[in-house]
Amino acid sequence: MGIYAGEMVKTLYTEVCDILEIKYPILQGGMAWVSDEYLVGAVSEAGCLGIIASGTAPGDWVETRIIETEKRTKKSFGVNVMLLSPFVDDIVNAILRHDSVKVVTTGAGNPAKYIEKFKSKGIKVIPVVASVAFAKRMEAIGADAVIAEGNESGGHVGQLNSMPLVPQIVDAVSIPVIAAGGIADGRGFVAAMALGAKGIQMGTRFIASVECNISMKYKEKIISANDRSTVVTGRITGHPVRVAKNRLAREFMKLEAEGANKEQLEEFGKGKLRLAAKDGDVRNGSVMMGQCAGIVNDVKPVKDIISDIIEQAEIIIKRLYIHET
């Protein structure tokens, strides 16, 4: 059975919208040194879910970001908790002090220790997962949904690509699955929904937005990228990262090839993301971006990015319906 043109918007409204209290099932990725109150507020105001990135920042820094975001939007927003952070307990306590935080996404670990604390405050918990086994484990501990993130994404990645990963996780769990990795427009949105996802998460596309409070050189690196502009480094550390090809990436890979150990590589990479995002050194800094950078060719206000995605998705759905009938 097809979809009538007048029902297009309804097809883009899923249970994720109800769970997260948003208009469109689109989440903004929690990107360290990138996802601050300016970007988060703009994304939430546009009807999606903005997410503050805590990274390895202290709890009081994260709490300040929450307070500043509260000034910019009264709509739903979340916080991403990087579970390997040395300040994770302080960050969790900061989140629990603010009723404005409706959602927590987690990465780099198992959030089981904190699930009940979040649930007691009515906070939805959505872990980022890169395998079927971990997705099933997250459902078992009470996660409200999972973000299935493919290898195409920027920053920390798993090994499976989104196309095989998303449907396998959809088949394995009963909670909603949000697709991430390689999505930057309406085509990716519709493709993710076709794979069974109930929403999408985007990071790279939102970096190239007016409201993103980072160096313009970082944004220019994204919009000038092509299909082969990124590389994955750090497999040996157990926490591989997709970044733009630049001097830093070449030196990092050279150290890997020469047999540098995990500690040496981590020390070499320390502070390099901030160097790129805030200082604008895109040669010696870590320019984290996904493979979808090759289809991002402009810097726009967040509301226009979202509007373009929804419009393109609706056009695709309409064409599919016409073709079917």
Image (cartoon, rainbow, N blue to C red):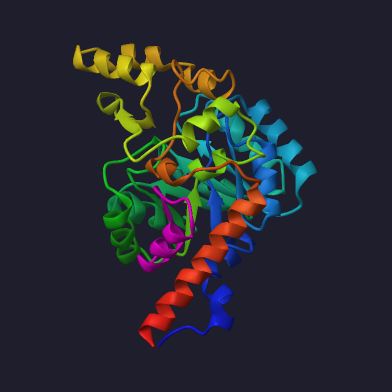
Image coordinates of residue 240 in percent, x first then y, are 32, 31
How many badges with numbers are in the image? 0
**Magenta residues, start to end:** 179-197
Quadrant occupied by the C terminus:
bottom left
Image coordinates of residue 284 in percent, x first then y, are 44, 15
In-front residue for pair 43/66: 43
In-front residue for pair 296/261: 296
Looking at this view, name the residue that lies furthest to the right: 71
Image coordinates of residue 264 in percent, x first then y, are 32, 11
| Left/right of residue 1 with respect to residue 164 in the rendered view | right
The residue shown at (43%, 41%) is: 293
Asked whether residue 320 is in view, the answer is yes
Image coordinates of residue 226 in percent, x first then y, are 38, 38
Looking at this view, name the residue that lies furthest to the left: 258
The residue shown at (31%, 18%) is: 250
In magenta stretch: residue 260 = no
In magenta stretch: residue 188 = yes
Residue 39, quarter of the rendered image: top right
Quadrant occupied by the N terminus:
bottom left
The residue shown at (56%, 65%) is: 311
The residue shown at (52%, 74%) is: 11
| Left/right of residue 82 with respect to residue 174 in the rendered view | right
53 versus 60 height, above or below:
below
Asked whether residue 121 is in view, the answer is no
